Amino acid sequence: MKNVIACIDGSPLTQQVIEASAWASSKLETQLVLLHALEKQKSSEHDLSGTIGFGSREHLLTELTELDEQRAKVALEHGKVLLEYAEAYLDGRAINLTKLQRHGNFVETLEDLEQDALLYIVGKQGTEHTSKSVIGSNLENAARSLSQPIMVVSNEFKAPQNFMVAYDGRETAIAALERIAHSPLLKDIPCHLVMVKRDVADQEDALEKARHKLSELGFKVESHFIEGDSIQGALHEYQQKNQIDLIAMGAYAHSKVRQFFVGSNTTKMLTDSQVPVLILR
């Protein structure tokens, strides 16, 4: 069975991740996995090769090792408490769920589970981030590495009453549209299919074909060309003006090298969005 995987880390967005995951697992009629990935703790060991004596260094190293062991135990227990909290929070809802705690790198853990994953739910920021103007350090790597969709939660989650597809007609956007069209996740929710005007041939035809595809499959869809100085700025303005509850888009169409010079619309959308973003590869 394919699962919805909720990434629980104890950040301020944890409860919203749980809410989004419960909604998604109900819509997809599949099991919810509450996941806590316990990454390797940074060692407290420092360079003690200064002027202190050998015996003192040995004593300090022993104390630092014991401190690291205590930190690892606390982190393990903290993860268990988080998972128990999430399970208790969902108690009484008709959701088939299980808890899972894994040791290791966060992105590698998600990759290991990908064969059984239908959708990942993550918070925009992790425990080390307090500003809403940045995304978590693992998020971009996960979005680049995983082939399954990721829903990024950035604020209080509510079941979406509408959603917007940021469409540009490129390969990643077409692939995203295919996933949306054949998934029950967003079925029966009104869709705004939005394309930012650019000096590109056949934009109108591409948008109409996409609208027709979704309409044929039973989506209530309206399509719009919009204008703006920047792609992400125009999309966010449309989202806010039309009170869109969720944004769906393809992710990372360009290589990291090109993005170093021209930037990434995906990263900018994730950074600026105050509603959930569903990114599809």
Image: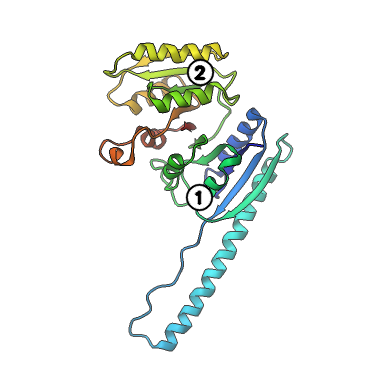
* Label 2 secondary element: strand
With respect to residue 11, does 183 lie above or below? above
Label 2: few (<14), some (14–19) or many (≥20) C-alpha neighbours in 10 Å: many
Residue 181 in picture, x, y percent from top left: 54, 21
How far across and down, in percent of the image, does residue 210 sit? 45, 15
- Number of other residues with Cα within 10 Å of mark 1, as a class: few under 14, some 14 to 19, many 20 or more: some
Query: Gap between marks 1 and 2, in whole Å?
Result: 34 Å
Pair 1/2: label in front: 1
Left or right of residue 49: residue 110: right
Q: Amino acid at mark 2?
A: Cys
On the rendered structure, is 120 left or right of 132? Answer: right
At horizontal 67% and vertical 42% (from top left) the residue drawn is: 89
The percent position of residue 3, horizontal first and vertical second, equals 63, 38
Front residue of this view, candidates 124 and 257: 257
What residue appears at the point 45 percent right and 52 percent down from the top-left corner? Answer: 128
Report which residue position mark 2 lands on: 191
Q: Secondary structure at mark 1?
A: helix
Q: Is residue 15 visible?
A: no
Which residue carries the number 1 mark?
108
Rendered position, 161 above or below 262? above
Numbered label tally: 2
Q: Which of the 4 quarters of the picture holds residue 193?
A: top left
